[in-house]
Image (spheres, grey):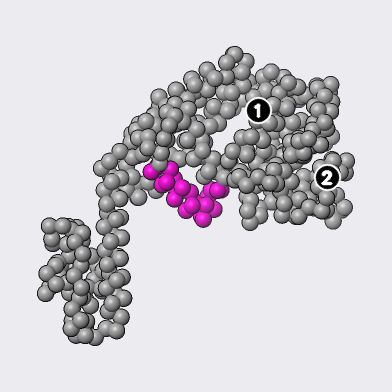
């Protein structure tokens, strides 16, 4: 009996088998009222006639391929014809992220951070089962409602000014899920992203308060150091994190990723913390941060014989180390420690310590480039951050 073959992908398999009483069409399935009625067994005589030793194996393989094709077509139809949910978009985002990561265009922490940010925005406005929320709710109104909710929770006007940077940062990260390359990937996968997303991408950011490092008063810095020292026995992780940002100017993600094995000695005999790409970590900027001997002694106090692969802080925690809950917890803990001791206009309060570490290098060397290399920033960013501190007038582009 002849067979309708319209799929070149499976043509080779059809040369070995003929299905009794059935014809297969790639578009319509089996020519039966019930498309998923099972295939009839191939007559042993026909198998012998074909003379192929592995006929049974080929039959099983063909069944599996046909089933996979039908599932893929059903999924594509679901994506094209039904409302997309947030869960389906995030699943596609993770698939895109894996490709981008393999190509070296994106870090795993960036992929996770973008997903967490979008979940955070949606949950603030639509609490509940976020996975089943329709994608058309991701619109301009979602951004505005998220901003209003966060500002209302902040309370007084001074606190509202401080959280504006955090709100903008969350929205900016969430928008990465709908970046141009990601949208191209979704289209190839058969997903139709609703036009409402354009409003989500176009909504304005909140106007942030004027930033810039003013410096930390000596008296306040002494109080901070004394307070941090009092934590060296009861909250060792927070104390070590304080040292790493206060004396070495590390970012929160770098603090979480740092391991004891990163402590090295240069050929000149200087102790440094080597921040460079490793198997499990890709830093924002690679550099060797010098460590004063006194700082090193305080950092390793109580560590004993530590494993080089052991994290310097939060060693017993099993959470994801970058872009996950630990990042937020550490950032908030450091901010709560520092906030009472810095000026009220500071937006990222824990980063005031990082900027202070850079200002120490700037004072010693009188070089923006040296401070930028120490912090892992560009000279342009350092010049902007220290404009108030140095009394530099902002550059005006014509």
Mark 1 — residue?
A: 348
Residue 392 visible, this orientation: no
Pinpoint residue 230: horizontal percent, then vertical percent. 82, 31
User: Are circles 2 and 1 on residues that touch, CB within 8 Å?
Assistant: no
Q: Position of residue 191 (x, y in %)?
A: 33, 45
Tell me if 156 is positioned left or right of 53 in this view.
Answer: right
Q: Earlier in the sequence, mark 2 or mark 1?
A: 2
State how far apart marks 2 and 1 are (Cα): 30 Å
Nearest to the eye among marks 2 and 1: give it: 2
Q: Nearer the viewer, residue 149 or 176?
A: 149
Q: Residues within 10 Å of mark 1 (few under 14, many from 20)?
A: some
Packing grade of label 2 (10 A; few <14, some 14-19, many >=20) is: few
Q: Nearer the viewer, residue 303 or 83?
A: 303
In the rendered structure, does residue 99 fall within the stretch colored magenta?
yes
Q: Position of residue 160 (x, y in %)?
A: 58, 18
Label 1 secondary element = loop
Residues in magenta, as a range: 88-108
The x, y position of residue 119, in whole percent, is 47, 35
Residue at 74% from the left image edge and 39% from the top image edge: 237
Q: At 60% from the left edge and 45% from the top edge, which residue is drawn?
A: 319
Q: Main secondary structure of the magenta part?
A: helix
Left or right: 182 in relation to 277: left
Rendered position, 252 above or below 166 = below
The quadrant of the picture occupied by the N terminus is bottom left
Quarter of the image that includes the C terminus: top right
Q: Residue at x 76, y 55 (%)?
A: 307
Q: Quadrant of residue 25?
A: bottom left
- Circle number at residue 83: none
**Residue at the image point whose x is 67% and y is 19% from the top:** 345
Q: Which image quadrant is residue 228 in?
A: top right
Determine which residue is flagged by label 2.
Answer: 302
Q: Is residue 102 magenta?
A: yes
């Amino acid at each position: 009996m002849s067979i309708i073959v319209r799929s070149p992908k499976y043509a080779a398999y059809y040369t070995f088998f003929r299905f009794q009483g059935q014809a297969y069409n790639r578009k319509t399935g089996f020519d039966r009222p019930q498309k998923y009625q099972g295939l009839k067994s191939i007559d042993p005589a026909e198998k012998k006639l074909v003379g192929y030793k592995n006929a049974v194996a080929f039959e099983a393989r063909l069944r599996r391929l046909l089933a996979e094709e039908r599932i893929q077509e059903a999924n594509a139809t679901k994506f094209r014809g039904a409302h997309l949910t947030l869960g389906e978009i995030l699943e596609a985002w993770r698939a895109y992220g894996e490709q981008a990561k393999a190509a070296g265009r994106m870090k795993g922490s960036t992929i996770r951070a973008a997903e967490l940010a979008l979940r955070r925005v949606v949950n603030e406005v639509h609490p509940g089962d976020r996975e089943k929320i329709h994608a058309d709710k991701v619109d301009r109104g979602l951004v505005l409602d998220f901003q209003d909710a966060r500002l209302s929770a902040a309370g007084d006007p001074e606190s509202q000014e401080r959280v504006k940077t955090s709100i903008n940062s969350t929205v900016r990260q969430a928008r990465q899920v709908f970046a141009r390359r990601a949208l191209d990937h979704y289209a190839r996968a058969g997903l139709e992203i609703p036009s409402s997303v354009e409003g989500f991408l176009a909504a304005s950011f909140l106007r942030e308060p004027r930033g810039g490092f003013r410096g930390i008063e000596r008296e306040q810095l002494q109080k901070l150091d004394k307070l941090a020292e009092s934590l060296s026995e009861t909250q060792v992780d927070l104390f070590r994190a304080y040292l790493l940002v206060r004396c070495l100017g590390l970012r929160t993600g770098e603090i979480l990723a740092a391991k004891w094995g990163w402590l090295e000695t240069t050929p000149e005999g200087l102790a440094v913390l080597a921040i460079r790409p490793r198997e499990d970590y890709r830093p924002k900027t690679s550099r060797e941060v010098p460590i004063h001997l006194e700082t090193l002694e305080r950092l390793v106090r109580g560590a004993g014989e530590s494993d080089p692969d052991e994290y310097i802080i939060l060693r017993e925690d099993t959470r994801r180390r970058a872009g996950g809950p630990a990042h937020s917890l550490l950032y908030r803990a450091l901010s709560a420690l520092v906030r009472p001791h810095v000026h009220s206009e500071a937006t990222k309060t824990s980063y005031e310590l990082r900027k202070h570490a850079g200002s120490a290098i700037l004072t010693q060397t009188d070089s923006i480039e040296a401070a930028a290399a120490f912090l892992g920033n560009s000279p342009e960013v350092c010049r902007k951050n220290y404009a108030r501190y140095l009394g530099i007038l902002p550059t005006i582009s014509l």
